[in-house]
Amino acid sequence: MEELTKLVFEKIEILKNKFGISDQDIARGIGVSKSSYSRIRNGKTKLTLDVLLDIARYFNLPAYYFILASDRLDQYSFSTLLKDYLDKLNWTYEKLAQETGILIFRFMEFDQGSNPTKEELKKIESVLTVHFPQMSLDPREHAIKLLLEELGLEERKIENILQYIGQNKSYKT
C-alpha cells in the first residue's frame, strides 16, 4: 500500500471510530460503491486526488489533514526548524529575542503555528547565520507538494501549482 493511501486511511479510521461511521457511510458520502471504496482502502485501486477531495469534503476537513501525519507536518514547521537551530547554539527564545529585537511573544506564536513576517525572518536568519527553506514556512503547501508528487505530477507542474497558490493565498501567513 502506498504511503499516501496508508496515511489517509489511518486518519479515516480515527474519524470512523470517533463518529461511529461505517465504510459504507463513507462510500455513499463520496459517491462510490462500497467495493470500490474497499479496493481503494486496501491499495488495490490507486487513491486519486478527486477521491481524496471527496473524502475531505465528506468529513468537512482540509485535504492536507489526511495526507500528512501530524509528526511529519511538524518536522517541516518553522518552529521546529528554529528550535533545532537554537538547540545547536544552546540558545533560548529569550536569547534570540534579545539578539533580534523581536518580542518573545512572537516566538510563542511561532510555536502555535504562526509564521514570521519577512522582516522577522530576515532578522532571525541574520542573527543565526542560516537560511530557512521557503517551503518550511507553510506546512500546508508542503503537504500539497507531497500529494502532487505522490500522484506522479511532473516537478515543473508542481512548481507552477505551488507558485500559483503562493500568489493567490486567501489566508494570512
Image (cartoon, rainbow, N blue to C red):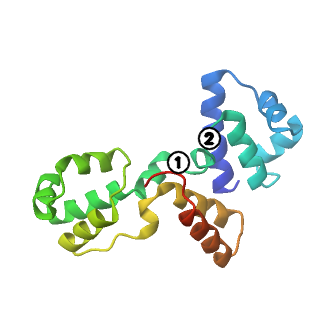
Q: Quadrant of residue 84?
A: bottom left
Q: Amino acid at mark 2?
A: Glu
* Tag 1 residue: 69
Q: Is residue 103 left or right of residue 151?
A: left
- Disc 2 element: helix
Q: Is residue 125 left or right of residue 44?
A: left
Q: Is residue 37 left or right of residue 144?
A: right
Disc 1 + disc 2, Cβ < 8 Å: yes
Which is more toward the observer, 130 or 6?
130
As displayed, is residue 82 above or below residue 24?
Answer: below
Q: Position of residue 16 (x, y in %)?
A: 66, 28
Q: Position of residue 94 (x, y in %)?
A: 12, 52
* Tag 2 residue: 10
**How packed is label 1: few (under 14 Cα within 10 Å), some, or many (20 or more)?**
some
- Disc 1 element: loop
Q: Would residue 47 be seen by someone viewing this image from the given angle?
A: no
Which is more toward the observer, 165 or 58?
165
Q: How many marks?
A: 2
At a point 87% along the width and 40% down the height, the residue shown is 32
Residue 84 got which mark?
none
At a point 27% along the width and 70% down the height, the residue shown is 122
At a point 15% along the width and 54% down the height, the residue shown is 92
Q: Position of residue 144 (x, y in %)?
A: 60, 59
